[in-house]
Amino acid sequence: MNTQDVTILRRLLASEAPLDMPTLADETGLTPEVVNERLHSLAQCGFHFSNEASGVELDALPASLVPEAIAALLPDDCLLGQSIQVLKETGSTNDYVTRLGQGNAPHGTVVFALAQTGGRGRLGRRWHSPAGDGLWFSILLRPDSPIAHWPRLALAAGLGIARAAERLVARPVSTKWPNDVLIDRRKLAGILLESRAQGASGFVVLGVGINVNAESFPEEIAEIATSLKLASGCTFQMNRVAADLLAGLDDAIKLCMNDFHELLAQCSQRDALIGHPIEIHSGPETIEGHAMRLGPHGGIVLRSADGSEQEILHGEATLRKPFP
Ligand code: BTN
């Protein structure tokens, strides 16, 4: 990621009027020659600038993902995305980021792939990840919190994505424990949280797949999937969606670390299962009960017929009756 490009783009994005070259150079701490050279290089990556007598203006972002565009759109205090890579294709971004985690890559490193050839979902499922209409990415997290608290990050991720998506489509977005984000009860996004606990150098890989501009899906998921575009009728700028999701995830992860009770309350309020009779398939077992709330270990608290409550930590949950 070129940090000079990010600095120039941030300054142009923050300006409502064209910026003359001396001001742009002065405010970015670069020489006019370097600014000119960087604007040229950015234009070759798909950025559109107008460069009139009145100054330089950023007219449009590239249609495809570019690390510098995403970074320039992030809030200043965002801890995620200090390092961003965009790969044309990889097997699975979770596997790629796991390899980075085994090295020295810092907390908040993000890797997007335009396409994944072996995208993985939960429970060993395949995750359909073609090039074009979705965002497939993984984030490296090095939490300070005890390992027992790491599963909480899956709840934070669901909340962060749901809140960001809700702002984009201006419609309610819900979560479904443990890892789905839904609009109109159809799956918009999935989360795959994987961790490597190795003493002080342990890490978490948070993988996210979200359908953005998709208008149709393969037959096997056509009835259960949706996209931001299908939910709103709008076509989205991929770099903006990527930055909004990272900012939403960053906020929710901070909330998870600083006020887990508040995170649980917000997640419980948004979860499509809470308040309904459900069954959870966990290995060979099926557990039935009334979904009460999300629990302190990132599980779902079920009340059984005898009134006892237990927090279930893993499994695939389904409603026992269809949604009313
Ligand atoms: C699920 O709902 O089952 C989780 C889906 C997670 C998919 C994402 S796409 C980016 C990252 N890389 C993967 O191989 N999987 C996750």
Image: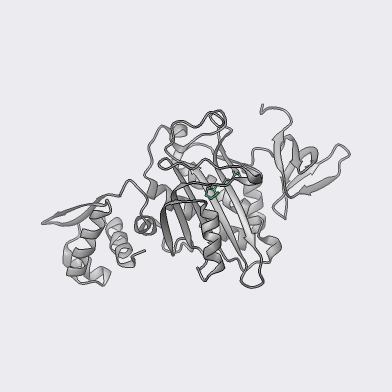
Compared to residue 165, the image places residue 248 above or below, namely below
Q: Quadrant of residue 147?
A: bottom right
Q: Quadrant of residue 293?
A: top right
**Quadrant assignment for the C terminus:** top right
Residue at the right extreme?
A: 306
Compared to residue 273, the image places residue 194 above or below, namely below
Q: Inspect this view and state whether residue 205 appears.
A: yes
**Quadrant assignment for the N terminus:** bottom left
Q: Inspect this view and state whether residue 252 appears.
A: no
Residue closest to the eye, 217 or 77: 217
Indicate the position of residue 205 as horizontal and vertical percent values: 57, 58
Residue closest to the eye, 198 or 162: 198
Residue at the image point whose x is 45% and y is 41% from the top: 130
Residue 57 horizontal side relative to residue 248, left or right: left
Residue at the left extreme?
A: 53
Residue 96 horizontal side relative to residue 288, left or right: left
Coloring applied to the structure: one colour
Residue closest to the eye, 31 or 214: 214
Residue 84 horizontal side relative to residue 9, left or right: right
Residue at the image point whose x is 54% and y is 63% from the top: 99
Compared to residue 197, the image places residue 134 above or below, namely above
Indicate the position of residue 297 as horizontal and vertical percent values: 72, 55
